[in-house]
Image (cartoon, rainbow, N blue to C red):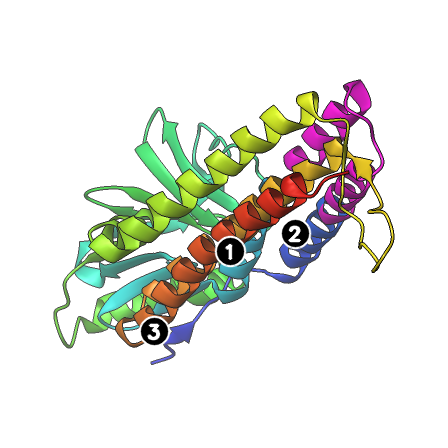
Amino acid sequence: MNVGHFPPPKQRGLIIHGVLILTLAVIAVAGFINLTSAEVGPVFLISLLIALASFIPIPFLIYRAYSLFNADYHLDRDSLALKWGLRVEDIPLTDIEFIRSADDLTTPLSLPLFPIPGGLLGMRRHPDLGAVEFLASDSKKLLLVATAKRIFVISPDNLAGLTQTFARATELGSLTPVESKSVYPSFVVTQAWQSGLARYFWLTTLLLNLGLFIWASLIIPSTQNIALDPQFAGGAPATMPSSQLIIFPVASLLLAMAGWIAGLYFYRWERERPLAFIVWGSGMVTGVLFLLAVFFIVATPV
């Protein structure tokens, strides 16, 4: 029997995600660079907002690209496994009521919010089917996988191959009964939160970054210049506008976010969890170092 992998189309989605990530990264970098020369005022605030608004979606787009790259639908005589990043759904074949094309519906499916090719993800409600969960990449190749609990929408590149294999597997029957399994990305966060050490690293890093932002926002309006440039022996310190202090809390926050996501990635496996704690601990230490950097800059007379 022909069983195996029926992955979704990936090339177009990966290209679109790559272009979006690169475009947002260029805008964010340009915004942060503009902060280094802008005086406190509307231009400074606009540059900060543009830089932050461009950077915030980047980690989510990177995760979606990673999820698409590793996405797969695996069908055998016992189960259908849907894998999309940290989202895993293992469905026993005996629990599947039918698999059919979404084109057969009298009422078309509504696509999820932000239906970027390569990332049709999320829950929608259909008037006939009820709750529907999308784990798909191509709106033109949608299949419905119906179970008693929920309808899943997938998009294998080889539609005919999957449906024919499912029909053949149903005729032959299951060899080994399996239990259904559902894993969500939020499960990793919840599991890590139960660790006291992880909570300590997360909360301490958060408080350090909030404190750094508040401190910088208080210093900038009340101080005209700071000694940010290198000071040569015997010479007067070169000064810069105090608005450039915002670089420190922004950089600290961006590194903290990247470290938090990287730690969650490692935390998924028992053997890699020490690396997760190292990354989260490093984020806390980095926050302390940024605080010290701001302290020494402010304490330097100009």
Does the segment drawn in magenta span residue 29?
yes
Point out residue 33 in the picture as x, y percentages from the top left corner: 80, 43
Q: Disc 1, disc 2: CB below 8 Å?
A: no
Q: Is residue 239 magenta?
A: no
Q: Residue 114 vs residue 188: left or right?
A: right
Residue 116 figure quarter: top right
Categorize mark 3 by other alpha carbons within 10 Å: few (<14), some (14-19), many (20+). Answer: few
Judge by depth and name the residue closer to the eye, 286 or 223.
Answer: 223
> Vertical placement of 123 versus 233: above or below?
above
Q: Secondary structure at mark 2?
A: helix
Q: Quadrant of the C terminus?
A: top right
**Residue labelled with disc 3:** 272
Residue 46 drawn above or below residue 259:
above
Q: Earlier in the sequence, mark 1 or mark 2?
A: 2
Which comes sooner in the sequence, label 3 or label 1? 3
Q: Is residue 218 shown to the viewer in this render?
A: yes
Q: Above or below — where is 172 with respect to 281?
A: below
Residue under label 1: 286
**Amino acid at circle 3:** Glu
Magenta-drawn segment = 25-53
Q: Are marks 2 and 3 in contact (CB under 8 Å)?
A: no
According to the image, label 2 marks what residue? 17
Question: Which residue type carries mark 2?
Answer: His
Image point 42% across, 41% down: which residue? 206
